[in-house]
């Protein structure tokens, strides 16, 4: 059984036991359970429910494992022949969640 859910504006294909990184969920602490009602599609292998836009009565339960930051990316700007160079780094925050129930 799997489902396609929407969390913080992004879509994820999940099934029970999966660990996924979603954009940081600021309203929750580590160890909290999060219930997601925005289920776009749900399938058990035989029957597929497609929402318009969401599947009625369907929900996915997530367990928040940890908050963290992704690997650092470097943003480098340069204009040739003008002696202009700028380097900037960025680490995107995320939340690691485990799918408890679909």
Image (cartoon, grey):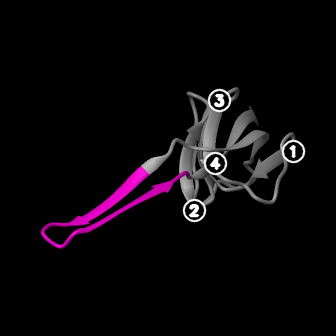
Task: Tell me which numbered mark, 2 or 1, is placed earlier along the sequence.
Answer: 1
Give me the residue at 58% from left, 35% from top.
Answer: 47
Residue position marked by numbered label 3 in the rendering: 18
Residues rendered magenta in the picture: 74-91
> Is 60 in front, or is 92?
92
Q: Position of residue 80 (x, y in %)?
A: 15, 66
Task: Tell me which numbered mark, 4 or 1, is placed earlier along the sequence.
Answer: 1
| Crowding near the residue tagged with mark 4, few <14, some 14–19, many ≥20 C-alpha atoms within 10 Å | some
Circle 3 or circle 4, nearest the eye: 4
Q: Is there any visible trace of residue 43 in the rendered image? A: no
Task: Tell me which numbered mark, 3 or 1, is placed earlier along the sequence.
Answer: 3
Residue position marked by numbered label 1 in the rendering: 32
Circle 2 or circle 3, nearest the eye: 3
- Prevailing SS of the magenta stretch: strand
Q: Secondary structure at mark 1?
A: loop
Residue position marked by numbered label 2 in the rendering: 53
Give me the residue at 22% from left, 69% from top.
Answer: 83
Residue 73 is a magenta residue? no
Which disc number belongs to residue 54? none
| Crowding near the residue tagged with mark 1, few <14, some 14–19, many ≥20 C-alpha atoms within 10 Å | some
Residue position marked by numbered label 4 in the rendering: 94
Between the residue at mark 4 and the residue at mark 2, the CA separation in whole angstroms equals 26 Å
Task: Tell me which numbered mark, 2 or 3, is placed earlier along the sequence.
Answer: 3
Residue 79 is a magenta residue? yes
Q: Secondary structure at mark 3?
A: loop
Q: Secondary structure at mark 2?
A: loop
Between the residue at mark 2 and the residue at mark 3, the CA separation in whole angstroms equals 24 Å
Q: Total number of numbered labels?
A: 4
């Amino acid at each position: 059984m799997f489902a396609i859910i929407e969390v913080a504006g992004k879509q994820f294909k999940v099934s029970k036991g999966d660990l996924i990184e979603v954009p940081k969920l600021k309203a929750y602490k580590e160890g909290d359970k999060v219930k997601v009602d925005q289920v776009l599609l749900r399938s058990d292998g035989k029957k597929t429910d497609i929402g318009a836009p969401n599947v009625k009565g369907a929900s996915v339960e997530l367990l928040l494992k940890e908050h963290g930051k992704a690997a650092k990316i470097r943003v480098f700007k340069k204009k040739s022949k003008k002696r202009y160079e700028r380097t900037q780094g960025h680490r995107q925050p995320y939340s690691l969640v485990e799918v408890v129930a679909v």
